[in-house]
Every structure is written in C-alpha cells, then in structure tokens.
Image (cartoon, rainbow, N blue to C red):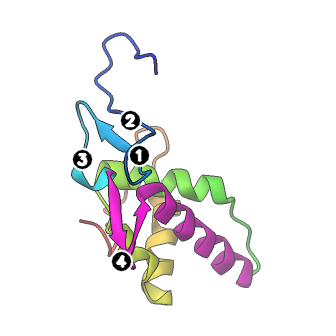
Amino acid sequence: MPKLMGSNLPTYRESSPEGARIWHGAGARPWSHAFNFRGSNMTRTDIIVKIAERAVRLYAEQGMKIKKLDCMMDIETVDDSIGLKLDELLDADLSNFAHDIGGISRHLNRITGELEDCFVPRYAR
C-alpha cells in the first residue's frame, strides 16, 4: 500500500492467522484488531457493518431512508475520533441505539470528523 508523503496514518495487512486486519504504525489502536465478540473473532469492520444494517432497518421501520455506507462511514469516523464501544452499541436496547445512531448522524461534522453541539454518544469510550 503506497504511503502519502509525510503521512503518519496507520496501515494494515490483510493476512493474519485469524484472518483479521491487523493495524500497525503510528495511530494504531489495540481495538483495531479482532474483537472477541459473541465467542467469535469479528473484526471492527464486521461489527460496524452489523450496526449499520441494524440502523438501516430501524430507519426503514420509521419510514425513513438511510444509506448503509453513509452510516458505516459515520460510525467509523466517530470511533476513530472519540472511540465507541462497538460491541455494546450493537447489542444496545432500541432507545439507546437510536440515540447514538441518530445523534451521530445529526451532530457529526463530516469535514472535521468531530461531533458538534456537545453531543456525546452513550456508548463512547
């Protein structure tokens, strides 16, 4: 993977014994590896996909549309900036899940990647 000039962004390698993406380099975090979630080795991306799928269903039940990819990018951005308890968010009850997903969607500044208006997700680290 080519690096940008002067970039300190973490990179990953696709292959590991467990098949999980392993992040390394500046900015790598321990929870970027595989989660031990529900007795399996789900990756961070797997959990974000499941959260986004649940959010799409929740919005559809209310007669609203949300794009799965947009939701995934929002969740990943917030997890990168402040950290989220992704496994707990996925299992959250309806009101707490809706609070965090709706709040992230409403208060995320997609230019800076920061949450505005003093919003803090209930499942923030």
Dot 1 falls on a residue whose secondary structure is loop
Q: Is residue 119 visible?
A: no
Q: Which residue is mark 4?
A: 88
Q: Which residues are magenta?
A: 33-61
Residue located at (44% from left, 52% from top): 76
- Residue 29: mark: 3
Q: Position of residue 43 (x, y in %)?
A: 43, 58
In the figure, 106 relative to 77: above or below? below
Q: Are marks 2 and 4 in contact (CB under 8 Å)?
A: no
3D distance between C-alphas at marks 4 and 1: 21 Å
Mark 3 or mark 2: whose residue is earlier in sequence: 2
Disc 1 packing (10 Å; few <14; some 14–19; many ≥20): some
Residue 84 coordinates in the image, percent (x, y): 33, 63
Residue 38's disc is none
Label located before the other in sequence (4 or 1): 1
Element at badge 4?
helix
Spatial distance from mark 3 to mark 2, Cα to Cα? 12 Å
Task: Tell us which disc is closer to us: 3 or 1.
Answer: 1
Q: How many marks?
A: 4
Q: Position of residue 65 (x, y in %)?
A: 74, 68
